[in-house]
Image (cartoon, rainbow, N blue to C red):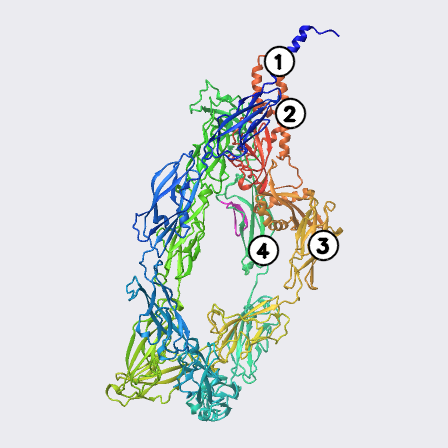
Amino acid sequence: MMKMLPWVKTLCGISILIVIVCGQEPPRFINDMSNVRVREDTTVGSVVYTLLAEGGGTGPITYGMVETDKFFVDRATGEVKLRRLLDYETNPQLFVTVTALGSNNLMAQRTSKVIIVDANDNAPEFSADTLSFTVSEDAAIGTVAYDSLVITDLDVSNSGLITLVCNTTKAAASPYPDVCNKFKLRLKSVSNKDWRGSIYLDGTLDYESKPFYQMPLTAFDGRFYTDRSLEISVLNVQDAPPRFVKTNDINKPEGIPANTILDYVQAIDGDSDNPRQIIYQFTNNGTGNKFSINMTTGNISNNIALDRESPEFALGYEDLGIIAREVISNNPPVYGDDPQTTAKISIRVNIYDVNDQAPTFNPVNYEVTIPEDIPNKTPLPNLSLRVTDLDVGPNGVYTLTLDQYTNEFEVSPGTGQGSTPAIILIRNTSLIDYERGPRQYVMKVVALETQTETPQQSGTATVTVNILDVNDNLPQFTQPNFEESILETAPGGTSVTKIQATDPDSGILGTAGIRYGLIGDGVNLFRIDPTSGVVFVENCPTPGAGSCIDYEKKHRYDMTVTARDNNGLGQAVTINLIINILDVNDNPPAFTTSDYTSYIEESKIEPSPVVIVTANDPDSNSQISYSVIADPTNLWQIDRNTGKVTAKQPIFYRDTPANQGFFIITVQATDGKFNPTANVKIFVIDINDNVPVFESTNYREVISETTSGNVYVLTVKANDKDSPTTGAGIIDYSIEIGASGKFVINGTTGVISTSLDATFDYDLTRMYNMTVKARDRGRPQQTGTCYVTIEITDTNNKDPYFTPSTQRADVYENVAIGFSVHKMRAADPDDNSVLNFFLVEPISAITPDGVPVDRSNYDITQLFTINQQTGDVQTKIKLDRDRASVVTLTVHVVDVTATPQQTGTGNLIINILEYNDQHPQFLPYNNVTIDEEQPIGTFVMALLATDQDDPIAEYQIIQNPDNFFAIGYQTGVVSISSRVDFEEVEFSQFTAQVWDSGTPRLGNTTTVYVTIRNINDNSPIFNQGAYTVRIPENSKGGKFVTNVFATDKDKGDYGVVRYALDSEETRFTINNISGEIFVAPGAKLDREELRELDIQVTAYDSPLDAVVRRFSTVTVYITLQDENDNPPKFNQPEYLQQIIETIPIYTHVLQVFATDPDDGNNARLQFSKVPGSGDPDNFFAIEPTNGRIRVDRSLLRNSGTYVFHIMARDEGGSGPFNSTAKVTIIVLEATNSPPEWTIPPLDNMTINVLEEQYLGMLVYDVEAKDSDRNDNGIIDYGFYVNGVYTTITNEFRINPITGVIRAEKVYDRETRDRYLLLLVARDRGDPFLETTRYLSIKILDVNDNDPKFPTNSNGETKEIQFEDIDENKPVNSSLGRLLGSSFEAKDIDDAQYSKVFYYIISGNEKGYFRLIPETGDLILTKRLDREEQSVYLLDIQATNNISDYTVIRSRRRRAMDPSIATWRIQIKNANDVRPDFTQNLYHGCISVRSSLGQSILKVEAVDADSVGSVTYSIQQGNRDNAIGIDSRSGVLYNAVLMNSYGGQTFDLKLRATDQGTLYHNTTALIFVTEPTRQVKLVLKQPATEVRQFFEQIKKSLQKLTLQNGDFIFDYVCATQIVDHVLDDGQTTSIWSDVYISGIRRNYNGASYYIYPTTELLNLLNQQRSANSDQFDMLYIQNIEAGNAEKNYLDRTPTMVVMILVIILIILALLFLLLACWCIRSRRKQKEERLRYKSSFRGGYDPSFQQVPEFKIYDNSGFQNDEPVPREPMYAKVGKGRLDERAPEPIPQQIDEINVEIRDASPDSSPPPSPPPSPKDTPRLSEPAEEDYRIETEVM
């Protein structure tokens, strides 16, 4: 080891020493927390400081803190955190000791001051925890009540002043809502540390109403609120009167003994401090003898026993007036005597009744006499019951009933209370019958209590009713009718029949008193014995003739027999008497005419009109027979029984004698006794039985179009086999149709020539097809027909011409050379013309400024060239729009085949267009924020755009999801277009689009985002338009009334709702948050003062911001419900009346009136006499409901003064309050006597009056006598009606002087059959006396009503319908009976007039039914057939007359005549008819290319029965089951593919079967066609219409015939009817293509031949040439082979893609050529590059036009007026609907098509302008409703 050098050792030692010394130094503080400021509101755990020290060794320093509990330190990091909350107010600064311990274990220590920063963390404080003061209730306003109110705040950092307010919100919710108005704050000084002030009085105080207040005070220092309640005590002053605290009414039952304490009252001094003693006294001395009150205790006692029936308590109550007095001094006693020391009340002692009285009658026995026919509701005469129950209220309520005979009689009223008069009414007079008995009724009237709680008590009275007999029964005949027969020669005195009738009444009113009479037609020929009823023939000198009975004059007599009782003076009935006259043969037959004339056609045996000779014999027992007694030709015969004359053999004109043309024969009629004769003359009519026949059916001739007028063409000839000597053999010719004014025919010779002014034009009409008819002159006229065809040959004689003469085209200036601009359209009417086109002078042009182009500067003749053969105008050089914008070319078209050549001139105007390629751009903008609810039209922003090329054309909004915005079309200004509501949408957006004005138009879009700002725009809305509530009156404070509720659509504070009432409203309070309404404390609600209240409730929003607050109000309607708190009151305390003792019973002498302020039942008063108050004999009674006082018992000999009390009690007599009044009635002694009745002699006498008489008819004459003198003896007559005296009623009038009663109306027994009059005879004394008497008037019936069927609510008679009738119902079966059914007709007349007979008046013309008149039985007379008729409607008339011959003549509409009803007879079906096919033979076609299940034809069978449905099936002929049939619909279809059945025929046997076993068969021929066996008809009609009239086309084709007259086709079928396909492959819906096949039957008839296409085509073309008019009428334009293939290209998207591929290949070749040219010539490099770019951009190849393969795109059938774009076009293929699709463009030649297939979303760009329609071809067909289309759009 090498030894260490000494200097090295020394150096190492020094270094070690230095390290040791340095390492012993303690840490040094850099941040020691000295004077750190910490806020006192710093949260516990927050870092408030970070200690930092250095040194102390090389290791980490450890930090610490001692002598504090406020902070703690992180020992590693030195972060100081708060341990406990700081409080500036306790310690504004702290001293802390921090330490730092180094890694060398040396510690540094530092004591630092921490400053605490004040924060507003202390709420303001009141000077005392409890604040209170007192104030006297009589203190004046302005008095300082509290003078040292101090609020302090310990904080010093709060920047605001301390505020102190009285919290009105808390006060309103407290019992002291007015405290903030009573007491006010007064400020003395204020700072951020304290508030000093006082409280003063600002309102009056009342200790008695509110002795205490709590004033809520709120102090605020800017952050904290402090609430304190200030207690205010009101000092009492002795100023209040006594106040009763117990004052209820006293309710006690009767029977309480005297000196019983009933109840007490209590009052206290109104001054609660030092209250005085109270003493009690009565205020009215009248109660002192009945009740007493203890002066000290207030106890109330009765001095006498309580008896409700005693006079002392007759009112049932006693009102006690009580006064409470303050004891001012006891020694000496001094009591209060002024309003401040006394109080008065009134209480009522109610004595309620106990049931201790039973109902009683006075008297208890009654006896009356009534006639047996007394009317219903008639009171028993002279019977007045009086029942009395002295109890009151429910105890005095009872029912009145009868113990028996309750069906015959009833008591009125049925209930009573107290004293009630009652009567007994007739309930059902039909049960009272003297003949049946009983003849005396003895019954008891029972009054039974019903509402008592104790056992019910009752009383009875006995009533005896004696029955008097009256003539109330009609005589009754022994049988319903009488019918007899006698010979017409019966002599006088012959007995016919005997009529008998009976009457149950006795004596002369019964059978013994019946007398008979005879009325009607025949009473001069017959008579009846009035007593025995025997009918005799009256004596007559010539029986059977003259004026005697004669069958030939009348063979039946209908008479009426009357039977009247009471020896012919009583009631009567009638019956029909029918006397039939028997015939005797005593008259010869007689012909209706002596000569008959008729006619007969040749070869007939029966004349027309038919000859039936008729001889009439008046005798009914004669049999007449006919015979021919003279006929020279012996050709005629006559039917022996019917008289019908006919020929024995066919008659001809030549059979007439001497060909005179008529026959005369003589016929005879005989009845075995007489033989009259008559002549018959019959003319023979010659007939035309041969038709003219043309020598040829078809004539044909050819003429030139230059043929002039009046030139012979040809002759037609017809022959008629009839003789030319008659009209039947003479022929006339005429052209029926087809001449068109060009041809005429000689009517005699048949020569056809051109008309005088005829001209022909091959180009207009090439053939004339005429129908010529030959007519003879016979009757009927016969005709023959032939067809003439004239063909017109053409001559080249017309110039060509352009269509139109001036044509226009647009072309863009950037198109390539050789571009096809336009194809000139020209036409030549001549056939075989060849047209060439040439450009000729003049040629002109103008610049865009409208200046003509100078050819020396720009050779416009070289701009375009024209194809000589096609007329296609193309660009020749590059176009320059700036030099020429419009070029006008002159074009010649020349027919080079004409000699000389023919020329037409036209013009082509070419508009050279500029091309647009710059899109407009929007200028920058910011998204916007708008307030909601801005007015429509408010400005939002301006969107501006610029375009480098063209002006801006328009702005539009294309997406506006909320429809909030609109944009100015030209300005771009965006405005509000509809209501903007923040509550519905908070954010919105819209997309705007701008378009320039270039061509093509270009556009751009932008989206703007809009933020909507909320405003307070909605007012609160109540959930009801108004509130209605009912509360009781006198409701106490705090009672809940109702709850209003309102909502606000706004959000946030704007949507918070609060409630308030009007500041002046003191009756109610409202909770401002919940909307609950209460009755205010102390409020007085009295219904009698104000029945209905209405208060306004205000709802407001935004409680935190009054500036934007919105209000709404609602009315609360409060109805006060009545409480019974008011007694009734009479309008006067006493009533006085004076009457005479002769006043009638029940006369009203006085009416009292009382009112009650209460309402409803509480105010419903019941009047009664106070029992025991006077009138002990009950001469007077008061009606309980109206207060009328009437005489209840006779006052005769009872004159004097009557005094009694009456009572009015509320609640209908059961209420707590009542009132009484005094009544005095003075009865004076009478000085005269009442009148006495003489006529009618008896009370309730009955008289009879006929109905349906006249106004003013004398009814009766009454009479009364009065023995008094002067006015007392003068009598006036009248009626009592409902207690009112009158001389006239609705039915009667009485003469007051004479007593004559007359009719005031025409009586109708059916409406009312009896009247009861109460007659009055009254003298003229003062007072007058009167006597009454009942008079019963019975209305007798006359036959004045027709029978009526039941009717509906609309007045029409109900339809008669019984069960449905089976169609196999046997003859003579009954189909229903009217009698006894619900359809029976009723007659409301009496039984003698109410017999109903029924007749059929219409609907039975075929005689299927017979109606029995007496019963209405409907009898079937013939067998029914439902298939012939399923419903029969018979009109039935009901009448009273069995022999009413007027029913047929008196038909009226059923709706207007209730005697006519319709009888509906519904025939039920029976399966008795088989189903029948509508055709005997069906045929149809189906193609071999048809899909599976293709419908072929439909068969139909009709079943006349309605039983079930028809099913279809195939029975035979269905090879391989290839054909199927739908069993329900009858549709035939192919069940297999038909490709292997081409040319075959299915001969099918079909069957239709009904639901039973019946069926029918038919044949259907199904022909299977092929494309090689069909032709195509091109029709100038839409396919939809062709399908509708194809049957007509088919029938027309099937009628085509060959030269020999044979039909060409037996059947024609169509396999397809579609839209017409144009030559270019497109379709049009204007025309249609119909593919048809023709079939004929082979000669053997067993098979069928389907024409091949070639043969079918030739046949149809031949027929078209021969019958062009017929084909034209079918709109047939052309006939083509059905299998011909067209050389057209389908313009489908696939083809478009193929074209694109070809164009791309050509472009690639073009690029290769351009590259070669660049290598060959550097000089042309730039030019070639430009051309390359242009070609790349434009996409056109100048050589493309020269490729002949693409001539397919050059469609000469269309006019191209579309502008040629400079930029490539693309086609949109989109799915859309017809109404959304732009018109389809005309296909044109283009160089490139870009195809884009996209969805049919709405295109925002405007649609292209529709092209003009093609002129020479039908319009393009519209696509289907949903399809794909190609639209050309320039982009």
The quadrant the N terminus occupies is top right
The amino acid at mark 3 is: Leu
Span shown in magenta: 741-755
**Is 749 in the magenta?**
yes
User: Residue 18 bears which disc, if any?
Assistant: 1
Kindly indicate whether the residue at mark 4 contacts the one at mark 3 (C-beta within 8 angstroms). Answer: no
User: Residue 1705 bears which disc, if any?
Assistant: 2
The amino acid at mark 1 is: Ile
Task: Give me the C-alpha separation between circle 2 and circle 3.
Answer: 61 Å
Query: Residue 78, image x and y in percent?
Result: 57, 26
Q: Residue at x 43, y 92 (%)?
A: 567
Task: Give me the C-alpha separation between circle 1 and circle 4.
Answer: 165 Å
Kindly indicate whether the residue at mark 4 contacts the one at mark 1 (C-beta within 8 angstroms). Answer: no
The amino acid at mark 2 is: Ile
The mark lying in front, picked from 1 and 2, is: 1
Please, what secondary structure does the residue beneath circle 3 have? strand
Q: Residues within 10 Å of mark 1 (few under 14, many from 20)?
A: few
The mark lying in front, picked from 2 and 4, is: 2
Using the rendered view, name the quadrant where residue 256 is placed: bottom left
Q: Which badge, 2 or 3, is on the more N-terminal residue?
A: 3
Which of these two is toward me, 673 or 1091?
A: 1091
Kindly indicate whether the residue at mark 3 contacts the one at mark 2 (C-beta within 8 angstroms). Answer: no
1790 relative to 290 in the view: left or right: right
Q: Which badge, 1 or 2, is on the more N-terminal residue?
A: 1
Please, what secondary structure does the residue beneath circle 1 have? helix
**Is 586 in the magenta?**
no
Which of these two is toward me, 1564 or 1810?
A: 1810
Q: Which badge, 2 or 4, is on the more N-terminal residue?
A: 4
Please, what secondary structure does the residue beneath circle 2 have? helix
Q: Which residue was labeled with disc 4?
A: 692
